[in-house]
Image (spheres, helix red, strand yellow):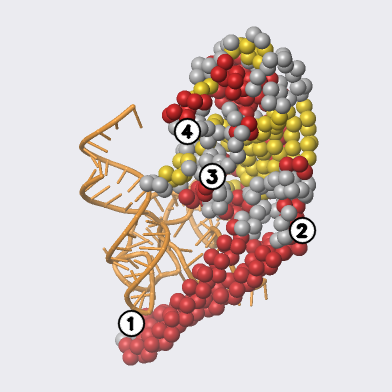
RNA sequence: AGAGAGGUGGCCGAGUGGCUUAAGGCGCACGCUUGGAAAGCGUGUAUACGGUAACGUAUCGAGGGUUCGAAUCCCUUCCUCUCUGCCA
């Protein structure tokens, strides 16, 4: 959520930046400013009436004490009309505040100056391309066939138990998955991130704090009886740990990493793009979250990008980094770098990580602030990224490491797996 | 799940209708004192919104209500603790 005070000062610049998302924001920004003006005027009026009521009440109190009941009665009469007026104004204030809020909820984050304008993924900028695409044998196959061939992932079994998009990992497949989780967590904690284990179900306030609610309600599984949501990413519970906090500047940055299963309803899309591990309703992910001083968030984002790149480098997977264009940017992000691994057998790029700076957009909703050295309370910057999402990394490994003898295990994972080949 | 107790500032804790503008203490900051430190003394110490400011308004878990006036009374709800039950 954008800050009204900043919209007041930067309306033109904001409208221009939002054009990068293909959005003409001038109208809505004007509506916001108008609602804000009404709100302030209403509050000023209400405050004046309340102040008068307060002082009258005090007078009545002293009059009663001195036994002057008659005079107190006169004043009592006066409060009636004031109370009436305050009720009306209070209602007006509530309405206009709510109207203002709902306007603000519809405005996405302001794209960072580095973000290129553009409509869709075709306008994304590649900022890095690394690793050699392996030359595979003639009869190389996509991961869902490999999964069957070596009996390590069973998609049909998942359908039987739950439905499509809930695979069952088995034997060396399950072990490889666990190895990846442990390896990712080790890399993240070695880089200074504190490991967390968090709830997989969150309440409405949490979903709201990170921006999944109220808009993207349909993307989350909802447990009706208890009114809880299954998390679509660890970002939700981890970031909400700090919801409403006021931290000291010296405590920043706060850095967390957490492994969780993630649950996404994901409407639409069929065919090869959702085959196998490409898109699931339940998948595993290791997330990194940073809460930063605003002055440091740009540098922190670069550090996160380097960190994720280093992991893919160690796994020896061919990958590229894309700076998302305005049209492809998520609602809450100000800048996002996507990591894609090349899946040789499918001949396509698979997104394995998304690293974003939300600047103050989430912090404003979360009411997550810090006390700066000048004694003022300011909103922090929040950042997060996958480090990394499991299924597509798994797909990349299976496909790129396949040989006629079986699937080799990347060297860094062998200590975690306890074997060096799936065959 | 049943019975009981309770939620007050950074923390502890007083407070059953109006000198509460939330006592007192701890902690923290600054000052005095000291050769230096501790102790002692003094001053200050929440958040949000509105206002250039002085200041005003709101906030005692949350939401309603009664009243001229609510931390205090009433209703609803959430949470915590103790005991009992159940359970990995």
Which residue appears at 52% of the width and 49% of the height?
Answer: A217
Depth order, front residue of A338/B12: A338
Say which element carries label 3. helix
Judged by depth in the image, the label closer to the viewer, 4 or 2, is 4
Answer yes or no: is residue A241 visible.
Answer: no
| Whether labels 2 and 1 share one chain | yes
Measured from the top left, where is residue A158 in percent x and y? 47, 28
Q: Label 4 marks which chain's residue?
A: A
So how many labels did they put on this image? 4
Answer yes or no: is residue A210 visible.
Answer: yes
Up-down relation of residue A198 to residue A216 (above or below) = above
Residue assigned mark 3: A219
Cα distance between the residues tagged 3 and 2: 30 Å
Answer with mark 4 or mark 2, whichever residue precedes in sequence.
Answer: 2
Measured from the top left, where is residue A286 in percent x and y? 58, 32
Which residue appears at 70% of the width and 31% of the height?
Answer: A349
**Tag on residue A163?**
4
Residue that lies at the very extreme toward the top in this rendered image: A405
**Tag on residue A65?**
1
Q: Label 1 marks which chain's residue?
A: A
Cα distance between the residues tagged 3 and 4: 17 Å
Say which element carries label 1. helix
Judged by depth in the image, the label closer to the viewer, 2 or 1, is 2
Q: Label 2 marks which chain's residue?
A: A
Answer with mark 3 or mark 2, whichever residue precedes in sequence.
Answer: 2
Dividing the picture into quadrants, the one containing residue A408 is: top right
Judged by depth in the image, the label closer to the viewer, 4 or 1, is 4
Residue assigned mark 2: A16
Answer with mark 3 or mark 4, whichever residue precedes in sequence.
Answer: 4
Depth order, front residue of A163/A324: A163
Cα distance between the residues tagged 2 and 1: 63 Å
């Amino acid at each position: 959520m954008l800050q009204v005070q900043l919209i007041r000062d930067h309306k033109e610049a904001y409208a221009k930046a939002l054009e990068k998302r293909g959005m003409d924001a001038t109208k809505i920004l004007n509506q916001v400013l108008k609602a804000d003006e009404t709100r302030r005027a209403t509050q000023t009026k209400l405050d004046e009436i309340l102040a008068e009521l307060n002082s009258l009440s005090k007078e009545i109190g002293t009059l009663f004490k001195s036994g002057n009941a008659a005079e107190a009665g006169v004043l009592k009469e006066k409060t009636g009309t004031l109370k009436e007026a305050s009720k009306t104004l209070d209602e007006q204030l509530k309405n206009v505040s709510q109207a203002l809020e709902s306007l603000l909820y519809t405005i996405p984050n302001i794209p960072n100056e580095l973000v290129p304008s553009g409509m869709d993924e075709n306008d994304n900028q590649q900022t890095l391309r690394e690793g050699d695409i392996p030359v595979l044998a003639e009869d190389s196959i996509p991961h869902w066939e490999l999964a069957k061939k070596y009996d390590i992932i069973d998609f049909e079994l998942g359908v039987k138990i739950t439905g499509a998009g809930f695979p069952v990992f088995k034997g060396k497949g399950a072990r490889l998955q666990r190895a990846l989780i442990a390896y990712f967590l080790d890399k993240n904690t070695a880089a200074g991130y504190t490991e967390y284990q968090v709830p997989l179900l969150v309440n409405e306030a949490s979903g709201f704090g990170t921006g999944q609610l109220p808009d993207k309600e349909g993307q989350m599984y909802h447990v009706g009886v208890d009114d809880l949501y299954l998390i679509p990413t660890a970002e939700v519970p981890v970031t909400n740990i700090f919801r409403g906090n006021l931290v000291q500047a010296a405590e920043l940055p706060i850095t967390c990493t957490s492994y969780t299963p993630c649950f996404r309803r994901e409407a639409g899309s069929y065919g090869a793009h959702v085959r196998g591990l490409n898109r699931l309703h339940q998948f595993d992910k290791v997330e990194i979250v940073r809460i930063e001083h605003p002055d440091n968030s740009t540098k922190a984002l670069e550090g996160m990008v380097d960190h994720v790149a280093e992991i893919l480098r160690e796994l020896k997977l061919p990958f590229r980094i894309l700076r998302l264009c305005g049209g492809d940017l998520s609602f809450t992000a100000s800048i996002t770098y996507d990591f894609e691994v090349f899946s040789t057998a499918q001949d396509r790029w698979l997104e394995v990580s998304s690293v974003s700076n939300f600047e103050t957009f989430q912090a404003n909703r979360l009411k997550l602030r810090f006390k700066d050295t000048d004694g003022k309370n300011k909103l922090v910057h929040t950042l997060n990224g996958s480090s990394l999402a499991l299924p597509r990394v798994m797909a990349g490994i299976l496909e790129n490491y396949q040989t006629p003898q079986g699937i080799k295990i990347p060297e860094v994972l062998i200590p975690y797996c306890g074997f060096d080949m799936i065959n």
